[in-house]
Image (tube, helix red, strand yellow):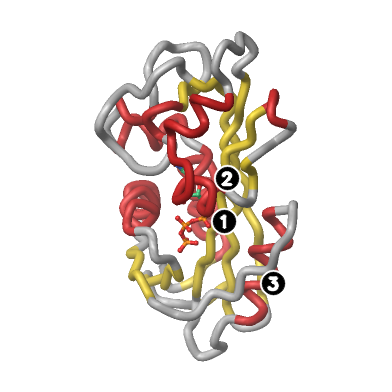
Amino acid sequence: MLHFDNKIFFATNNINKIQEAQGILSNFGIVIEKIDVKKVEIQSDVLEEIVLYALKKVNKRIIPIIIEDSGLFIEKLNGFPGPYSSYVYKKIGCDGILKLLEGEKERGAKFVSIVGFKKDKLIKIFKGEIVGKIAYKKMGRHGFGFDPIFIPGNIEKTFAQMNLEEKNLWSHRGRAFKALGEWLQSSIKNF
Ligand code: ITT
């Protein structure tokens, strides 16, 4: 059995991640608090490795804690930008990705989220994934990052055309945090 009150710290600089995670975890009675700790991010092609390393290095006094790493993997670009999504977004943004896929009909892509939870010596990893495609142009104003160009599943609507609740139903992050919430619910005492 896991013991703690209902608060978890989330080490991220991305306020959108906090809002999306809170949208899911409030269904499980959990409150998220953003915390600015230095996150050690190794360079790796594997999101799980990045999260595990960062969790191991995080300040031991801050518990329980979550770290999340996510990325957009585009089939035609052999999985690029993947773990480098944050850097690539800052450098070339949605327009840069649209340019790389100009004239391309195969636009398959997926978003992946790896959520790592740590309390004392216990570490758990949860994965969420959504397969979809890259739109031909930017659409919508909600969300962040690559949301205006990512269409989940077979609908004709980008993440940026959805409100937070709708995006959470589809998204990689929504799925990973739901898995965390379900696990916490079944493992926690004093909850
Ligand atoms: P932290 O590392 O501080 O948590 P970050 O934004 O840098 O924040 P990541 O390292 O996980 O987070 O980078 C993932 C990038 O992938 C993110 O900056 C976006 O550009 C993109 N991304 C991830 N999830 C996304 C989503 O739900 N919608 C749109 N873009 C997303």
Where is residue 103? Give x, y as percent.
57, 11
The residue under the point 39% across, 18% down is: 137
Q: Work out how far the residue at label 1 is from the one at label 3, CA to CA, in angstroms.
A: 11 Å
- Nearest the viewer among 116 and 85 is 85
- Disc 2 vs disc 3: which is toward the camera? 2
- Nearest the viewer among 79 and 168 is 79
From the viewer's perspective, is residue 123 above or below residue 127?
below
Q: Mark 2 falls on what kind of element?
A: strand
- Dot 1 or dot 3: first in sequence order is 3
From the viewer's perspective, is residue 59 above or below residue 86?
below
Q: Tell me which amino acid carries mark 2.
A: Gly
Badge 2 is on which residue? 71
Q: Tell me which amino acid carries mark 3.
A: Tyr
Check disc 3: other Cα within 10 Å, few if <14, some if 14-19, many if 20+: some
Classify residue 74 by image quadrant. Answer: top right
| Callouts 2 and 1 close, C-beta under 8 Å | yes
- Dot 2 or dot 3: first in sequence order is 3
Badge 1 is on which residue? 69
Q: In the rendered view, does 7 fall on the left or right side of 177?
A: left
The residue under the point 59% across, 73% down is: 118
The residue under the point 69% across, 72% down is: 53
Which label sits on residue 53? Answer: 3
- Nearest the viewer among 33 and 148 is 148
Q: In the rendered view, does 13 fall on the left or right side of 97?
A: left
Q: Is mark 2 within 8 Å of ligand 1?
A: yes
Q: Tell me which amino acid carries mark 1.
A: Asp
Classify residue 1 by image quadrant. Answer: bottom right
Q: Is mark 1 within 8 Å of ligand 1?
A: yes
Q: Is residue 182 visible?
A: no
Where is residue 55? Give x, y as percent.
62, 73
Q: Is mark 3 within 8 Å of ligand 1?
A: no
Q: Work out how far the residue at label 2 is from the one at label 1, CA to CA, in angstroms.
A: 7 Å
